[in-house]
Image (cartoon, rainbow, N blue to C red):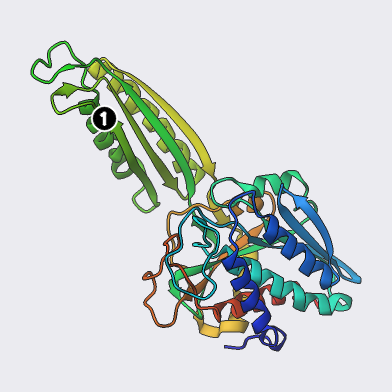
Amino acid sequence: MSILPDVKSIKNYIISTRRDIHKHPELSFQEYRTSQLVADELEKFGILVKRNIGKTGVVGILKGKVPGKTVALRADMDGLPIQETSNIPYKSINDGVMHACGHDAHTAILLGAAKVLAKYKDNIKGIIKFIFQPAEEGYGGAKFMIKDGAIDEVDEIYGLHVWNYQKSGTVGIQSGPVMAAADMFTIKIKGIGGHGAAPQGTVDSIVISSYLIQSMQTIISRNTNPLESTVITFGQINGGYNFNIIADEVILKGTTRSYTEENRHLIKTRMKEIIKGTEKMFGAKIDLQYKDGYPPVVNNELVTSNLKNIAKSIVNENVIPPYLSMGGEDFSYFSNVVPGCFFFLGSAPKDREPMSTPQHCSHFDIDEDAMLIGSSIFVKIGLQNV
């Protein structure tokens, strides 16, 4: 492994920055302190700063002396509404909020890269944009940054995620789909209630809900290609009044995940068809409220190939196929506009097995040495045309 000397020299800066942000987490669109920190640091480096892009986002612009393409490097900044249970010295001091997904590390990694790249301003060809994005956790902050011009005239974009599902020292990269479309739905079943001892004349919404749950699983098992990852999950059921009462209403809530827009559309269409048939079968009224979430993240083949070569120069044979999940990521909004690559930085703490400290858990932490790899990769992307 060959961490760049310039990055190694600021190891303490990267780690202390991450710990400071970890200690002061902020929820989506409330990243006021984090944005201030980021903007102030970028200005110290001599980088042009644009504040309040996409509400609480920050964009740093580093213009080289020689014309060339514009490359964007992206990090997200928001925390999660989780109470931290760790006893680390930099534990969150904000009650009910913590960095349980690693966005504190992403921000520190990109700031470290910006600090190094600013030293090479005279050698850089083209423009580097440092995009510090708010509200990735369910609010689609990327869309707001795009609306405010964050990636105007950008030729390619790169983003990373610290990934505790991979050993520290590895970098997971592949072209094609790497994160899923993440949609959500609510189904309201309206039947006719009555006494549990006299079901005749009723329309049992609980029976209907069980039928719907089972039927919709056949969308995955019988309508989609088994070689293409898709998921339908029912995460919530609410209905009923008592043990001997037939419920007149049940509300189901869940999520659908898919790696392609084709399967995303197929799942939604089949859900509507099954609901329509179920209404006729049982005589109930069923309403589907389907909300599109983030699109799938699909890595551009040429950009990904370029990144693989850069990553191999840092971690050698530890460039691996990523440990994929059906999670969603709003980096997809960026990469749907310009060619991009989203990669996974192995960050499992060295004294623990991968997956023992997963994303979104209350004791989440990372191997901080992994951040040096991330910063090194970002720096090499910025210097690739020097």
Dot 1 lies on which element?
helix
Q: Looking at the picture, how far across and down is residue 224, in whole percent?
A: 36, 43
Q: Residue furthest top?
A: 201
29 to 72, vertically: above or below: above
Residue at x-position 59% and y-position 73%: 19
Residue 383 visible in the displayed image:
no
**Amino acid type indicated by mark 1:** Ser
Q: Looking at the picture, how far across and down is residue 52, in whole percent?
A: 76, 50
Residue 124 visible in the displayed image:
yes
Q: Which residue is mark 1?
A: 209
Left or right: residue 217 versus residue 145 is left
Residue at x-position 12% and y-position 13%: 200
Q: Could you say which is closer to the camera, residue 270 or residue 369?
A: 369
Q: Could you say which is closer to the camera, residue 224 or residue 60?
A: 60
Q: Residue furthest right?
A: 65
Q: Residue furthest left?
A: 197
Left or right: residue 281 versus residue 226 is left
Q: Badge 1 local density, few (<14 within 10 Å), some, or many (20+)?
A: many
Q: Could you say which is closer to the camera, residue 70 or residue 225?
A: 70
Quarter of the image where the C terminus is located? bottom right
321 to 233, vertically: above or below: below
Left or right: residue 14 versus residue 266 is right
Q: Looking at the picture, how far across and down is residue 75, in whole percent?
A: 64, 62
Residue 86 occupies which quadrant of the picture?
bottom left
Residue 355 occupies which quadrant of the picture?
bottom left
58 to 315, vertically: above or below: above
Q: Looking at the picture, how far across and down is residue 63, in whole percent?
A: 86, 67
Residue at x-position 42% and y-position 35%: 185
